[in-house]
Amino acid sequence: MLVTDFLQMIKNRSEPSWLKQRRLDTFTKFSQLKMPDSKEEEWRYIDISQVNLDNVKIDGYTDISIDFGNDVIVLLMKEALNKFSDMINEHAFSLFTDADKFVSFVSSFWNNGVFVYVPKNVQAELPVTVKINNTNNPVYSLVVLDENSKLNFVEENVADKINPIVSDKINPIVSTSVTEIFVKENSKLNFFCSQILPENLYSFYYKRASVERGAEINWFLGSFGAKLSRWKVETFLKGENAKCQKYGIYAGNKNQHHDIITKTFHLVPHTSNNILVKGVLTGRASSVYRGLIRIEKNAQQTLSYMGAHTLLLSNKAKSNNIPSLEIEANDVRATHGSSVGQLEEEKLFYLMSRGLDRKLAENIIVEGFLETVLNKFTSDEVREKFRAITNERLLNA
Amino acid sequence: MELEIKDLHVSIEGKKILNGISLKIKEGELHALMGPNGSGKSTLAYVLMGHPKYKIDSGEIIFHGENIINLTPDKRAKLGLFLGFQYPTEVPGVTFKNFLWTAYKTLNNGASYVDFNEILDEKLELLEIDKSFVLRYLNEGFSGGEKKRSEILQLAVLNPKIAVLDETDSGLDVDSLKIVANGIKKLNENGMGILLITHYQRILNYILPDFVHVMTDGKIVKSGGHDLAKEIEEKGYEGIKDG
C-alpha cells in the first residue's frame, strides 16, 4: 500500500486519535521491515515467495458475526473503539513490542475484529462464538478476562466471499490476524479456534496470551484449510500457579502446508504447561511444528510438557516436528516427545482380521490417533465439528 | 463347515518356514497344535488369517469349499475365521467397545446395537471381566493377561465358525487361565472349531482336545488324541520327534 493510500484510509475512518497516531508509527516500521526470508529460523521451511504484504490490497471491513450471552461484553472492534477506547489503547499490541513484518502489517492496517471483555467475577455460562469471514483485510481481536472470571471463546475462520477456484498467483489472498488475550488473576479461558479456509489462501495467525496468578488458559486449535497456514501461538505465564494447556490438531491434503509454532514462557515459579499437537497428512501435504518451552531462572517448580506427533497417510506427505527446551532454572520438570510415522501394517492386519476392510481399518487408526487430542476438548460441539472436518479432509480425500 | 489345510508350503524373504502342512478342522472340534519355539506355529496362524508378509509357495487353504489363499484378512473374517493373537497390537484412541461394535456390525449385516450390548454383557460375565474394561482404548496399557482376555472376549462376541488361538494361554496366571480355558470350552461345545496353538501342556489340564498335533521345523511330525499331550510333557518334543 502506498503512503498516500494509507493516509487516505486513516483520514476516512472515524477512529480515536491515539489509534491514528499508532497506525502512523507502525506503518513507518512496517514499511522499513523486509519480508522474512528463509535464512531466518522460523521461516526456513515455509514458502512465502508468493506473499508480498507491501502489495496486498485492503478495503472495507471484515465481515464478522458474533453470538454470545448477555453477561459478557462482546463488540465488533470497529464499534468497541468508541466505547472502550481507553481499554483498547492500554492493551492493543502491548504483548507485541517485537512486532515482525506480519504483526506490524496487522497493527498498521487492521480494520475489524472482536473485542471481548468479561467483567470481574463473571463466570460466563454461554460461549462467545465468533465467525470471521477472512479476506485480505487484517483482523485484530482483544480478549480481556478480568479477575475471577470465566469464558469459553469459539473462533471460526472461514472465507465465504473468496471464490475457492480462482487462484491468483501474483496477488494471492493473504489472511492475517493478531489476537491478544489477557487472563487476569484466578480467571479461566477456554479458547477454541479453527481455520477452515479455502485452499487458495495464505493465512498467518498470531496469538499471544498473558496469564496472571492462579489463572488458566486452555487452547484448542484446529488447522484444516488454506494453501499455507501459519499459526504462532504464544503464552506468557506471568503469575504463580498460572496454567496453560495447548491442544491442537491439523489435517492436510493435496499440496497444503501447515506450519505451527507454539511457545510457552514460564516467567515465575509454580507454573505449568501441557502441549499436545497431532496432525495427519495425505497427498503431498507437509507440516512443520516448532515448539518452544522456555523456563526463566527464577521460574522454579515448573512443570512443562510438549508432545508433537504426525501420521503420514501417503509416501509423498512430509512432516518435521522440532521441539526445543530452554531451561535456566534447576528445579523443574520439562519433557517433550515427538514422532512422525506411517500407518503400521501390524495394526491394519489386526483390525482387518476382525472383518474391517482396509479403508475402514485405516480410518479407525486415524480417528484414534487424533482422538487422544480431541478427548481433551471441553466442548463436545467443537470436538464433533473437528472430527467431521478431519474425516471430510482425509478419509474421503 | 471345515477348514482344510492342504500341503501348505510357506516362506518369508526366501526362507522356508512351513514345509507341507496338512490339517483338517471341523466345526465343534478342538485341535491342539504343539511344538517348540520357532517350529512355525505362529507363522501358520498368521498365514491362515492372511498376513501379507508371508509368501505361500504352494498348497491350499480350503474354507467354505473355496481356496482362500488370495483373500484379504477381512474377507476371511467374514467367512467365519478368527485369529486370537499372541501379541495383540495397541490401538490408541479407539475404545475396545467401539472397535468391537464396528467389527460386530461388519460381520453381522443389520446387527442391532441393543443385541450387541446384550451379547457383550453376557460374555463379560462368562469371562469374569469388569464392565469398565470395554471403555479402555484397545489393548493400550493392557497387561499380558488383559490382552489375552481381550482376545477371548472378542472371540466370544464375534463368534466365528473356526478360531485359531495363538498362545492364548501364555502370560496368564492360574486363575485367569482357568477362566479363559472355560470360556474356550463353552464356545467349542457350542460348535466353534478351534485350533489351539500352545507351547505348553498347561492349558490342556482344563480343556481336553479332540486332537493333538506336534509341529517341528514347519512340519506336523505326529498327530494323536489328547494322550499325546501327556507324552510330550513326559518325553519333550525331541522325544516325540525321534519316536
Image (cartoon, coloured by chain):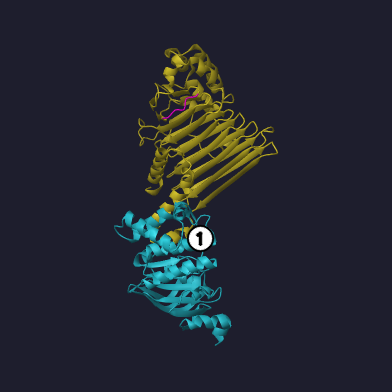
The image shows residue A337 at horizontal and vertical percentages of 58, 46
In the image, the segment drawn in magenta is A121-125
- For mark 1, give the secondary structure: helix
Apparent side of residue A127 relative to residue A288 in the rendered image (left or right): left
Name the quadrant containing residue A38: top right
User: What residue is drawn where x is 32% and y is 54%?
Assistant: B114
Where residue A343 appears, x then y in whole percent? 48, 54
Q: Residue at x 56, y 80 (%)?
A: B233
Query: Is there any visible trace of residue A392 in the rendered image?
Result: yes
Main SS, magenta residues:
loop
Q: Colour of chain B?
A: cyan
Q: Position of residue A229 (x, y in %)?
A: 47, 36
Q: Residue furthest right?
A: A330
Q: Is residue A172 visible?
A: no
User: Is residue B130 placed above or below A71 in the rendered structure?
Assistant: below
What is the three-letter code of the residue carrying label 1?
Glu
Q: Residue at x 49, y 53 (%)?
A: A342
B136 falls in the magenta region:
no
* Drawn side of residue A26 relative to residue B208, left or right: right
- Chain drawn in yellow: A
* Other-residue count near label 1 (Cα within 10 Å), few / some / many at <14 / 14–19 / ≥20: some
**Residue positioned 36% across, 35% down in the render:** A166
Q: Position of residue A196 (x, y in %)?
A: 41, 36
In the displayed structure, B175 sits above or below A127; it is below
In magenta stretch: residue A122: yes
Query: Quick check: A137 left or right of A181?
Result: left
- Residue identified by numbered label 1: B146
